[in-house]
C-alpha cells in the first residue's frame, strides 16, 4: 500500500498529519473506533492522541526524522498505545507512511486496535 492509497482507506481508522505534526484529517472509521471527531482533532498536534508517557519519545523520533529524512519506522507494523477520546489507553497496531498532501510532506497512519 502506498501513501495515496492509505489516505483513501475508509473501512479502517486512518489519521493524517502534516510535517509539523498537526492533524489534517481523520476518517469516519477513526471516529467510530476512537471517539474523536474532526472538530476535536484537526489543527491539533498528534500528541493529543498519544498517551502522555509516550509523547517525548514521539517528539524526539518525529524531530529526528524531519532533520535527517531517515525513516526507521515508516512502512512497518508497530504496536503502540493510542489515547481514545474517553481517556482509555488502547494498544493498537500502527502502519505509518509518508507522502504529500497539497505539495507538503505529510504522514498517515492506519490504526487497528489489538485485542
Image (cartoon, rainbow, N blue to C red):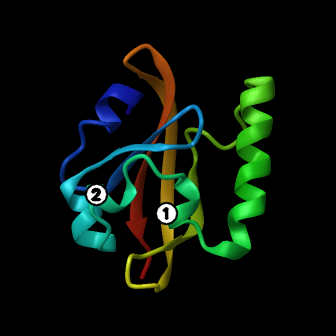
Q: Residue at x 46, y 85 (%)?
A: 87
User: Mark 2 packing: few (<14 Cα in 10 Å), some, or many (20+)?
Assistant: few
Image depth: mark 1 or mark 2 in front? 2
Q: Measured from the top left, where is residue 26 in percent x and y?
A: 31, 50
**Quadrant where the image shows the C terminus:** bottom left
Q: Nearer the viewer, residue 112 or 108?
A: 108
Q: How many numbered discs, if any?
A: 2
Q: Is residue 2 visible?
A: no
Please state if 115 lies on the left or on the right of 21 as rendered.
Answer: left
Q: Which residue is label 2 attached to?
A: 39
Q: Measured from the top left, where is residue 99 in percent x and y?
A: 48, 24
Q: Nearer the viewer, residue 74 or 41?
A: 41
**What's the mark number on residue 52?**
none
Q: Measured from the top left, where is residue 20 in percent x and y?
A: 59, 36
Secondary structure at numbered mark 1: strand
Q: Which residue is label 1 attached to?
A: 93
Q: Residue at x 70, y 55 (%)?
A: 58
Does 70 appear above or below 21?
above
Mark sitting earlier along the chain (1/2): 2
Question: Disc 1 and disc 2: Cα gap in Å?
Answer: 24 Å
Which quadrant holds residue 75? top right
Does 22 appear above or below 106?
below
Does 109 appear above or below 52?
above
Amino acid at each position: 500500500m502506498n501513501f495515496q492509497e492509505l489516505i483513501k482507506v475508509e473501512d479502517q481508522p486512518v489519521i493524517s498529519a502534516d510535517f509539523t505534526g498537526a492533524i489534517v484529517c481523520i476518517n469516519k472509521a477513526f471516529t467510530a473506533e476512537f471517539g474523536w471527531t474532526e472538530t476535536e482533532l484537526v489543527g491539533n498536534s498528534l500528541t493529543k492522541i498519544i498517551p502522555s508517557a509516550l509523547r517525548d519519545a514521539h517528539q524526539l523520533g518525529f524531530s529526528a526524522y524531519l532533520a535527517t529524512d531517515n525513516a526507521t519506522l515508516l512502512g512497518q507494523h508497530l504496536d503502540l498505545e493510542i489515547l481514545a477520546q474517553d481517556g482509555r489507553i488502547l494498544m493498537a497496531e500502527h502502519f505509518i507512511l509518508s507522502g504529500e498532501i497539497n505539495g507538503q510532506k505529510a504522514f498517515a497512519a492506519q490504526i487497528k486496535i489489538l485485542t
